[in-house]
Image (cartoon, grey):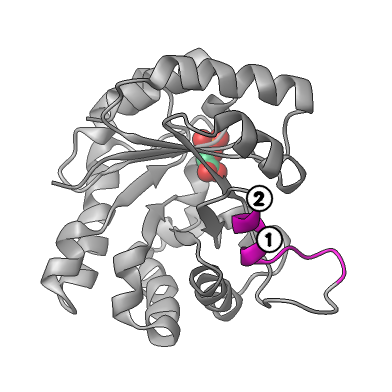
Amino acid sequence: MRRPMVAGNWKMHGSREENARLVAGVIDGVNGCVAEVLVFPPAVYVAEVAHLAAGSPVGVGGQTLCTQAVGAYTGEISAAMLRDVGATHVLVGHSERRAMYGETDAVVAEKFIAAQAGGLIPVLCVGETLEEREAGITEAVVARQLEAVVAAAGIAAFAQAVVAYEPVWAIGTGRTASPEQAQAVHGFIRGYFAAKDATLADHLRVLYGGSVKASNAAELFGMADVDGGLVGGASLKADEFVRICVAAR
Ligand code: PGA
């Protein structure tokens, strides 16, 4: 009932030449795939990748956006600009943005709202650090991160959004959450929404991110509340990424 989604977060990797090769390989491989497939190139390449992917089953998104719609914000990129060049989605609150660029829960909520106002579907990233997991506060942290956005945007906004659970300790470390660990938090996230709106929770896609590879994707995606993946490192190789996309059904 929930169509799976696999999203490739290229982070700050690539060049025009590499991107063209990568996106062509992904387009080639994902034809007939059950999952909705998206790639998230660095901002300067979004337009070109969207152009290359036009008419294909591969969608394109931005990795972040400005909280503001237009104006004197040197260096920033608005939701409407991303949409103008062909993006349909945007990552919001990725842990690297939170940890390295000072994005607080409040800023993340503003970006979520700005994304929707500009016509994009936000992919809201949440997740705990290793310290927080070891302190037994994973659910409290995830609930706080969700609540900040729900309080600001309203629960109904999540009918046009995707949530990604990305435990910080699993991102780029090769240390994946076990399928059971992932399911526990995904179940918690769905329950959080179900308590507010059962129908919405039922339709909400919750992706897992953190060292997803072709070799572990099927068992992660096989869990009841895991609706696909947000893939970093393994999205930079077309054949590996395609195998992950195929594993989501
Ligand atoms: P990873 O990154 O797959 O390289 O762990 C995931 C992410 O940051 O979205």
Percent position of residue 190, x then y = 21, 62
- Would you place residue 59 above or below residue 92 in this image? above
Give the residue drawn at x 39%, y 21%: 30
Range shown magenta? 74-84
Q: Which disc number belongs to residue 149?
A: none
Amino acid type assigned to the residue bearing label 1 in the image: Met
Residue 162 on the magenta span: no
Q: Residue at x 70, y 69 (%)?
A: 102
Q: Considering depth in this image, is 181 or 77 the residue closer to the camera?
A: 77
The residue drawn where x is 38% and y is 66% is 142
Q: Which residue is mark 2?
A: 85
Give residue 138's quadrant in the image.
bottom left
Q: Nearer the viewer, residue 71 or 243?
A: 71
Q: Position of residue 178 (x, y in %)?
A: 30, 36
Q: Hey, what amino acid is under mark 2? A: Val
- Please provide percent x and percent y for residue 86: 59, 48
Identify the image quadrant of the C terminus: top left
Are the residues flagged by discs 2 and 1 in contact, CB closer than 8 Å? yes
Farthest residue toward the bottom?
151
Q: Secondary structure at mark 1?
A: helix
Q: Is residue 237 visible?
A: no
Left of 117 or right of it: where is 143?
left
- Is residue 233 shown above or below 133? above
Q: Measuring 68% from the left and 22% from the top, which residue is drawn there? A: 20
Labelled disc at residue 81: 1
Vertical relation: 29 (above or below) 161? above
Query: Does residue 175 appear left or right of residue 190 in this picture?
Result: right
